[in-house]
Amino acid sequence: MPVSTTVAASGVTFTVLTVSSLVTVTLLAVGAVAVSLLLVDWGARVGFYNSDLTRVMALGRIPTLFKRLTGVVREAQLAAMERIRPGIALRDIDGAARKVIARAGYARRFGHSLGHGIGLEVHESPKVSFSEEKSLKKNMVITIEPGIYIENFGGIRIEDMVIIKKDGCENLYDAPRELISIY
């Protein structure tokens, strides 16, 4: 019989981040409709352990480009997750995501590392980056958060936490990843 467990958070991991001064909340003229993208990066703390999650929502009709970017970012995230297993170099995981984004023509629009370790601190070692030579070990918890950001237009990032298992990884979130309109 399935068991469902609900765990109440004991606090927030960090202040909920909605950065409107960068590319996160952008007003666009799409036909006669204004569209605003809202990137929300949030987390909770249970005991001493932290979480980190990012999703993007649209306020209004979703432009075709944002749908496409969301698809590319999700494909990049899945490509990275498919590479994850104990012993794999972190740069190879980052590379799998970058390859998808580059193939779609947005290589210069992904300007941060793919992810980071998380646990007692929100951002801790290891860094999931093209420059990181360390390898994954079973039971490590990392974030996978590819993104595409277009100056003066907007950005898409999908961030999930995964735990490294014997033969791959387990995504710790089931929150929707598609770009949704909340207007």
Image (tube, helix red, strand yellow):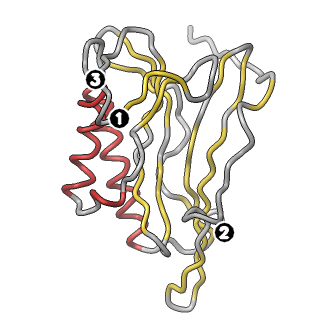
- The disc labelled 2 sits on which kind of residue? Tyr
Q: Which mark is residue 129?
A: 1
Nearest-to-viewer mark from 2 and 3: 3
Residue 156's place in the image compared with 12, above or below, is: below
Earlier in the chain: of badge 1 and badge 2, it is 1
Question: Element under label 1?
Answer: loop
The residue at which mark 2 appears reads as 183
Cα distance in 3D space between marks 1 and 2 = 36 Å
- Where residue 31 appears, x then y in whole percent? 50, 90
- The disc labelled 3 sits on which kind of residue? Glu
Q: Are marks 3 and 1 in contact (CB under 8 Å)?
A: no
The residue at which mark 3 appears reads as 133
Cα distance in 3D space between marks 3 and 1 = 9 Å
Q: Are marks 2 and 3 in contact (CB under 8 Å)?
A: no
Q: Residue at x 19, y 56 (%)?
A: 103
Q: Residue at x 52, y 34 (%)?
A: 174
Cα distance in 3D space between marks 2 and 3 = 44 Å
- Mark 2 is surrounded, within 10 Å at the Cα level, by few (under 14), some (14 to 19) or many (20 or more) other residues, namely few
- Where residue 29 appears, x then y in whole percent? 54, 86
